[in-house]
Image (cartoon, helix red, strand yellow):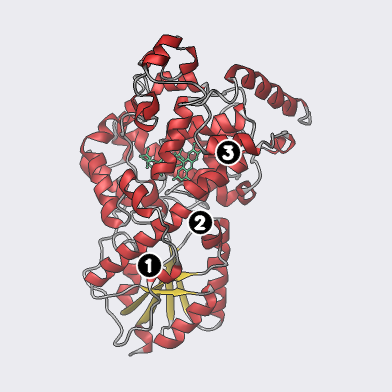
Amino acid sequence: MSRRTVTILWVRRDFRLSDNPALIAAVEEGIVIPLFIWDDSSSMAQDSGARSKSWLHHSLEHFSLSLGKLGSRLLVRRGTYMRVLREVILETGAQSVYWNRLLEPEEIALGGHVRETLEDAGFECKVFDSHYLVTPWQHFTKQGEPYKVFTPFWKAALQADFYYPPLAAPQKIKSPAFWPKSAPLKDLQLEQPDDADWIVEGGWNPGETGAFSNLSSFLDGQVQRYKQKRNRPDLDLTSMLSPHLHFGEITPRSVLFSLLHTMEAGHPAEFDEETGTFVAQLGWREFASYLLYHFPHTRTEPLRSEFQAMEWVNDPDAFDLVRMANTGYPIVDAGIRQLNATGWMHNRVRMIVASFLTKDLMIHWREGAAWFMEKLVDADCANNILGWQWTAGCGADAAPYFRIFNPVRQGESYDPDGIYVKRWLPELKDLPSNYIHHPWDAPDDLLKKAGVVLGSTYPERIIDHNEARIRALAAYDQIRISKPA
Ligand SMILES: Cc1cc2nc3c(=O)[nH]c(=O)nc-3n(C[C@H](O)[C@H](O)[C@H](O)COP(=O)(O)OP(=O)(O)OC[C@H]3O[C@@H](n4cnc5c(N)ncnc54)[C@H](O)[C@@H]3O)c2cc1C
């Protein structure tokens, strides 16, 4: 085997063949060794929740099959990154290591360390960008500061030069004469006992094929109603691309170009409002990663420093009731049932649940964020932090502190017929729609007819929203008062 032509493709979180710049560059060089490393001490291993791990397992399985069809393989090893990379370099005679960059603070540090160590030892490293449309070091305000408000950030980003088409998948990948040993996927112990249940319940298909299939259903009739209906959890109108984007099974560029093609547009500026609104959601994903890049402390601390003084409530019992979907507020409980059953929750309901936890119960947003990271299939550090800090009011462009979602009004506005609630809370299915979001107001005979016994077949409210609202406003006022002049 010629030393010159062997490149290790360090597969980090890009389980796809299409629009994969590191893969294409490695293929152009000659022989490619795709390598996935599971390092138990890494933040990827330590911070991944159960659902995320099992998605990873299925995604690796799918990617391995895709590589097989092109005459290649996915080499899987368990061990520390540097040790495994050194081993595989020695075993294959590789001289180069290529990868696509990840932007979470720990991943940046890891990439930097690997690059420095390998380059010092005389190996070539090439790093590519593909997880996002724009890179976070591209855009700043006129004062040279990072943006903290979405609209100007996205306006600036849309001017950037990212309108080049995604890269085609390679037709073939050159393999070495002898493959180094690979660990069986099951040795990584990523699969969970309840995998089959939530994958079926969520209709998930981890991997690149599933990503493109979700995209094509979305383009075929859903995107056209996106702006109008995206907030309706009863309608299943969003793209369900979040886990696929997180695991790099599809790139935002592929999504954007499919949209441009479907809409026969040359530039997002030509999109109609429905499509433009969807692209702006991709923009929020860009913004989340941009913020985490510039303000890495927000992983655990609020972006708005006055929130350091906030007196959160430590109430493990109430938090347990939330996690068990026993709050007594149907829209909140339905969302949590959806999360528990499928690993996903509709965005509007995520906001309602996050507002309930951080404002009604005043439980620290960090606890909510950790809970979501454990349960979500699309668990994504940047998006999750943005979502929780936005809702709690302590992040960039955040919901104002006085905006406390009323779970009854939210349910009535976004699930007007109670279809979503009834889907996830069948114990309320016979309750008339006009009481579905506040069963405690229903007359006794109606509850009886619907087979609902509050406190028995369905819980009583764990807190009165109106009282909770007053308490939250007082606490939020307190930190405004304690803010330095
Ligand atoms: C409290 C809270 C926690 C969240 N945690 C996560 C998380 O861990 N992982 C995650 O991917 N998203 C998270 N979100 C954002 C959002 O809820 C999901 O991205 C969305 O529901 C995924 O469904 P979809 O793919 O059908 O979205 P679509 O509406 O079809 O949007 C397309 C894509 O745009 C991106 N996107 C959409 N909305 C947002 C948003 N508000 N912020 C950032 N990116 C967005 C996602 O990548 C999504 O797949 C969170 C939101 C909140 C309020």
Q: Residue at x 52, y 69 (%)?
A: 39
Q: Residue at x 50, y 51 (%)?
A: 138
* Mark identifier at residue 48: 2
Q: Does any atom of ligand 1 lie closer than 8 Å to the CB of label 2?
A: no
Q: Nearer the viewer, residue 14 or 284?
A: 14
Q: Position of residue 115 (x, y in %)?
A: 53, 72
Determine the CA span between mark 1 and mark 2.
24 Å
Q: Which mark lies nearer to you, 3 or 1?
A: 3
| Location of residue 313 with respect to 295 vertically, above or below | above
Crowding at dot 3, Cα within 10 Å, few <14 / some 14-19 / many 20+, comes out as: few
Marked residue nearer the N-terminal end (3 or 2): 2
Q: Is residue 128 left or right of residue 65?
A: right
Mark yes or no: residue 139 visible.
no
Task: Name the residue beneath numbered marker 3.
Answer: 320
Q: Does any atom of ligand 1 lie closer than 8 Å to the CB of label 3?
A: no
Name which quarter of the figure residue 442 lies in: top left
* Mark identifier at residue 109: none
Amino acid on which disc 1 is placed: Ala
Contact (Cβ within 8 Å) of mark 3 with mark 1? no
Q: Position of residue 316 (x, y in %)?
A: 64, 39
Task: Name the residue beneath numbered marker 1.
Answer: 22
Figure quadrant, ligand 1: top left
Q: Residue at x 61, y 22 (%)?
A: 402
Marked residue nearer the N-terminal end (3 or 1): 1
Amino acid on which disc 2 is placed: Ser
Determine the CA span between mark 3 and mark 1.
44 Å
The secondary structure type at the circle numbered 1 is: helix
| Location of residue 448 with respect to 88 vertically, above or below | above
Amino acid on which disc 3 is placed: Asp
The secondary structure type at the circle numbered 2 is: loop
Name which quarter of the figure residue 446 lies in: top left
